[in-house]
Image: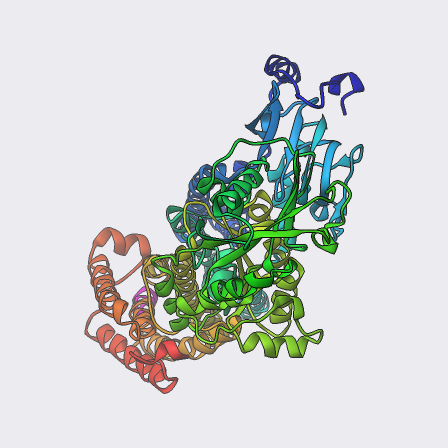
Amino acid sequence: MQGSSAVETAAEHGLSDAEAQRRLAERGPARKPAASRSYASIVRHNVFTLPNTVLGVLGIVTVALGEAADAIFLGIVVANALIGSVQEIRAKRALEQLAALVKPTAQVVRDGRARELDVAQVVPGDLVLLQPGGQIVAGGEVVVAEALLVDESILTGESEPVARAAGDPVLSGSFAVEGTGSYLVSAVGAESYAERLAGEARAFRHPPSPFQLGLNRLIVTLVLIAVPLVGALTISLWLRETPFDEALPTVVAGVINIIPEGLILLASLVYLSGALKLSRRGALTQQLNAIESLASADTVCFDKTGTLTEARLRVAALVPAGDVGEDEFAAALGRYAAAFPSPNPTLQAIEAAFPADGEEPAAQVPFSSRWKWSGVELSDGGYVLGAPELFALGPLESSATTEAAGGRRVVALGATAEPLGGVDPVAGPPQDTRVVGLAVLSEELRPDARETVEYFGQEGIRLLVLSGDAPATVAAIAGDAGMTGAKPVDGRRLPAEDGELLELVGSTASVGRIEPEGKRRIVETLRRSGGYVAMVGDGVNDVPALKASRIAIAQGSGSQMARTVADIVLVRGSFDAVPRLVAEGRQILRNMQRVSKIYTTKCVFGALMVLTVGLSPLPYPFLPRHLSFASFFVTGVPPFFLALAPSSGPWRMTSFLRDVLRFAVPAAAALTVGVGAAYALAAEGLDLEADAARTIATTIFVVASLYVIFCLEATDRGRAGWVGAMCLVLIGVYAVALAIPPVQDFFRLVPPGAQGVGCIALGLVLAVAGLAIAGIRPGRAARL
């Protein structure tokens, strides 16, 4: 905290640029907080996973006993750590570059002029201006406050905004919700950076996603299954007095076949790949699980401006009162708009249509979505601008109604002689306000609006427009965009009971004249009823609903506050990018559900082999090197391509663990029957040597597993062809590798003779028959 001498400055003009530079040099470079995890954290996270730890310990023991060839699975550990770390570091750099486009800035007064500065350039003594949605980037004391309300929920947990007056302190990381003002900076430093505070807020807001939780449960379940099975296998080997140098490879083989060594790596890669794809489309993913959440959304709520309609408004018509000339009305509108230092979109449109010299107002009432009007007191009296229903329109009433019903935005300008300095804005405009006229503003429907609405309808996602504009205007725009069921609903008259609110919201596609708390209540009610709700917003009035939603999406042109609480920021994109993001997320989930079934089938197969052959007098059918060789063809190459490739077909958000096991258990049982029967015949019935019998078991496992993969993908017409070709190529590569002497020697494989081929054929027939009985066959497996 700096002393009082450090913050002495002219509150009206701010610091001089020379003085600011001197103080900046004196302070030294500010420590920039990490926008994401550090490099060391990324490496630790990818090296010390549960599967890597288990496999690493077993590998070290195996090497220590002189069986380095059986520790080849350590390559999987190294690959997991290396690939995961490299990809996450690449993603970190790409996303940090994108995040720089939406980082907070401060409007600082230097040499009597306001300028936009990076927060790192703010020094004690700076005078910082505040507008609705602006972030307080450093601690300080309020100098000027005009109806200023500050949201400190990220810091204090207090959900209600607090009023701040001149002399009150403001906290770094909070936001101006309503009103305007300025504050004198007294403390800067790393704790003042919005990025860190925003990151903490986001991490607190979203727990692990359902898919992440399901994946974690699957990993833990498989490890817990492996522990007693390996214990039973160890006891069995001890009772049979198996030599240690034979028992250890058997135990290691049993363990590595149950551990899904590459699944966590693949899930991380897919999430990161999805985040990078979204970044190329101008979307910054601030939570990795936001990709899944977006894919899971069944309802999307949004404001119409900047989504269905273009973000910029234009003045389409003026309707002056009977005793006012159009030129007089236009001049009054221009003076009014020019008097606000930071105009909202409505004032920007008026200012562009009727430019005027700016005047210093004696007093002003900032606009708020709660009271829906604003005002300025100029030299010759006051003007107020707001929703038409706040005024006695008289003959202008019919014009306002007609224009609103046609989808236009209508605002009324009034004149008042009453001072605005001490008015209560919640009570409405002053009683003596005389209407000067109506300004009709046009919002052009976005060219892609109808296509976007149509996409959501095809995907079964419901759209709901929540807007502060007149109900008739909102309903008309929604109808023009192709949203069925849109009707005028007044958000100021929402039912008190949740059941009635659900019924009302379910009967329409739009709600107008809705306040921020109304938006939040609708989102919360939909969530409590079981909905998976996404909220798209850009302004301060959208923030409560953004916080309440399951997935918050902010437009890059929106307020700092909206961008901070969002999970996805449309930096360069607009609402038409959201369908592509949904499609990307659903592809990711669909692919990961399928790939998880492949890994889990292999793991359950390993558990069943331990329970059957492993506990029998027969030698175990695999050495660790056999499983490492087989894993390349089963859980190495195929899942990598399948997880990242385009996909189509059914997608559903149900219990991940139940869905995966419902497929994996019968598939693994069929593989166990085929491999176990053929191996027993080869080892006992035909009395083949151990390596030959194990080669038969490995071959059946590889070929039958590739058939399972093809069955799983055959319902996807876009992938069935190339997946089938990939499986045939991998079988060919396996056959060629089996004929290469160095490969034979290293992996202890024996090319099968006539008897071996017969055993392989028998095992494959049994496995395919078992799969068919379980309903796993081309064209049907994906439905399981």
**606 on left or right of 513:** left
Residue 722, image x, y percentages:
23, 65
The outermost residue toward the bottom is: 773
Left or right: 550, with 179 as reference point: left
Determine if the magenta segment contains residue 693: yes
- Which of the two residues, 15 or 405, is positioned nearer the viewer here? 405
Residue 475 on the magenta segment: no
Q: Is residue 661 visible?
A: yes
User: What span is colored magenta in the figure?
Assistant: 688-695
At which x and y percent is residue 662? 47, 78
**Residue found at x 47% / y 36%:** 355
Query: Where is 141 relative to 160, above or below?
Result: above
Instruction: Residue 660: give x, y in percent of width and height.
Output: 47, 72
For this rendering, which residue is in front, 29 or 325?
325
Tell me the colour scheme of the image: rainbow
- Tell me which residue sits at (59%, 36%) in the image: 339
Q: Is residue 361 left or right of residue 506?
A: right
Q: Quadrant of the N terminus?
A: top right
Front-most of 586 and 366? 366
Q: Nearer the viewer, residue 390 or 555?
A: 390
Q: Answer whether residue 680 is visible to the viewer in this image.
A: no
Q: Residue furthest front?
A: 323
The quadrant in which residue 185 appears is: top right
- Residue 34, by quadrant, is top right
Residue at image x 56%, y 64%? 397
Looking at the picture, how far across and down is residue 440, in whole percent?
48, 55
